Image (spheres, rainbow, N blue to C red):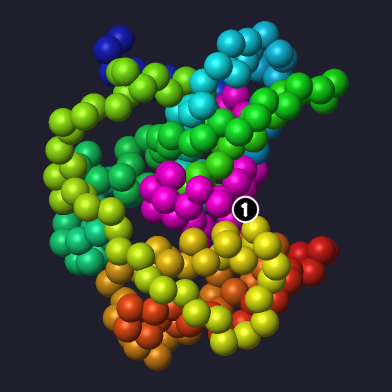
């Protein structure tokens, strides 16, 4: 292996704590669920105020993350994008599949607040698309004049994903949790290749176990129970 192709060891700068304890319900792109909040907890030696000096002037940041729960040693060069029904294969570099050569993710999230304390540095963010415990490898400010390309073309992902109507057939949690669950389920987290009308899905969102099924253009929530604190 020559100098140009040798591997590089990456050191996490922080850990992303999110409202999604499992992979299943995580939005497939950042920004689709503004209600989805998270906290980037910086770790030593990066958890010092000088590491984020000036970041407060930006409304959004890029998070370079690692798909740490992808355990398969995938060597294939194609992936199946959910936007195409999960059955058509495209080149891995034409998709945002987590099954990537280096398992790297890239998300733009809203920076709501920077929390500085004796315990270190925490970045409160929203619009996240990552599971709880995701390693953060780098943080960069979102620069609108360079990062927002007005005439960009989105290939097979030109349009916003379909939103389903969420209906509840059970008691509902109050306030922001209800909004978070509604927004998450409206994107239909079920695998795109599954088309079973009577299938019931289960997932964890925030501190709630939720079951639901799809009925046409609707998602019907069948149950929603708080996860025991010792879970």
State left or right for residue 61 relative to residue 85: right
- Residue 76 placement (x, y as % from top left): 23, 48
Q: Residues in magenta?
A: 12-38
Q: Could you tell me which residue is drawn at 51 percent across and 44 percent down?
A: 128
Residue 120 visible in the current orientation = yes
Q: Is residue 157 left or right of residue 35?
A: left
Residue drawn at x 35%, y 88% as measured from the top left: 197
Q: Please identify the residue farthest to the bottom as the structure is shown.
A: 198
Up/down of 53 relative to 225, above or below? above
Judged from the image, the secondary structure of the residue bearing numbered disc 1 is: loop
129 lies left or right of 52: left
Q: Residue at x 39, y 48 (%)?
A: 29
Q: Is residue 132 visible?
A: no
Where is residue 77? Give x, y as percent.
Answer: 20, 45
Q: Residues within 10 Å of mark 1 (few under 14, many from 20)?
A: many
Q: Residue at x 22, y 66 (%)?
A: 85
Image location of residue 199, percent across then percent down: 42, 86
Report the number of numbered marks. Answer: 1
In this view, 220 is above or below 114: below
Residue 227 appears at what percent x and percent y? 73, 69
- Magenta segment: does it hold 29? yes
Q: Which of 210 and 126 lies nearest the eye of the viewer? A: 126
Residue labelled with disc 1: 19
Which image quarter: residue 44?
top right
């Amino acid at each position: 292996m020559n100098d140009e192709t040798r591997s590089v060891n990456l050191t996490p700068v922080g850990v992303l704590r999110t409202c999604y304890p499992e992979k299943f319900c995580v939005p497939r792109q950042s920004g689709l669920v503004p209600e989805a909040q998270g906290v980037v907890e910086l770790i030593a030696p990066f958890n010092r105020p000088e590491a984020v000096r000036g970041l407060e002037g930006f409304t959004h940041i890029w998070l370079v993350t690692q798909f740490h729960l992808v355990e398969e040693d995938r060597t294939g060069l194609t992936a199946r994008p959910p936007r195409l029904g999960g059955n058509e294969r495209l080149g891995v570099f034409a998709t945002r599949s987590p099954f990537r050569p280096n398992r790297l993710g890239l998300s733009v999230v809203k920076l709501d607040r920077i929390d500085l304390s004796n315990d270190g540095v925490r970045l409160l963010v929203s619009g996240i698309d990552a599971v709880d415990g995701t390693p953060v490898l780098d943080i960069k400010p979102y620069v609108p004049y360079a990062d927002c390309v007005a005439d960009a073309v989105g290939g097979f992902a030109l349009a916003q994903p379909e939103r389903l109507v969420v209906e509840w057939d059970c008691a509902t949690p109050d306030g922001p949790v209800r909004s978070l669950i509604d927004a998450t389920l409206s994107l239909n987290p079920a695998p795109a290749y599954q088309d079973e009308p009577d299938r019931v899905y289960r997932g964890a969102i925030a501190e709630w176990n939720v079951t639901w099924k799809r009925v046409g253009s609707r998602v019907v929530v069948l149950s929603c129970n708080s996860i025991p604190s010792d879970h």
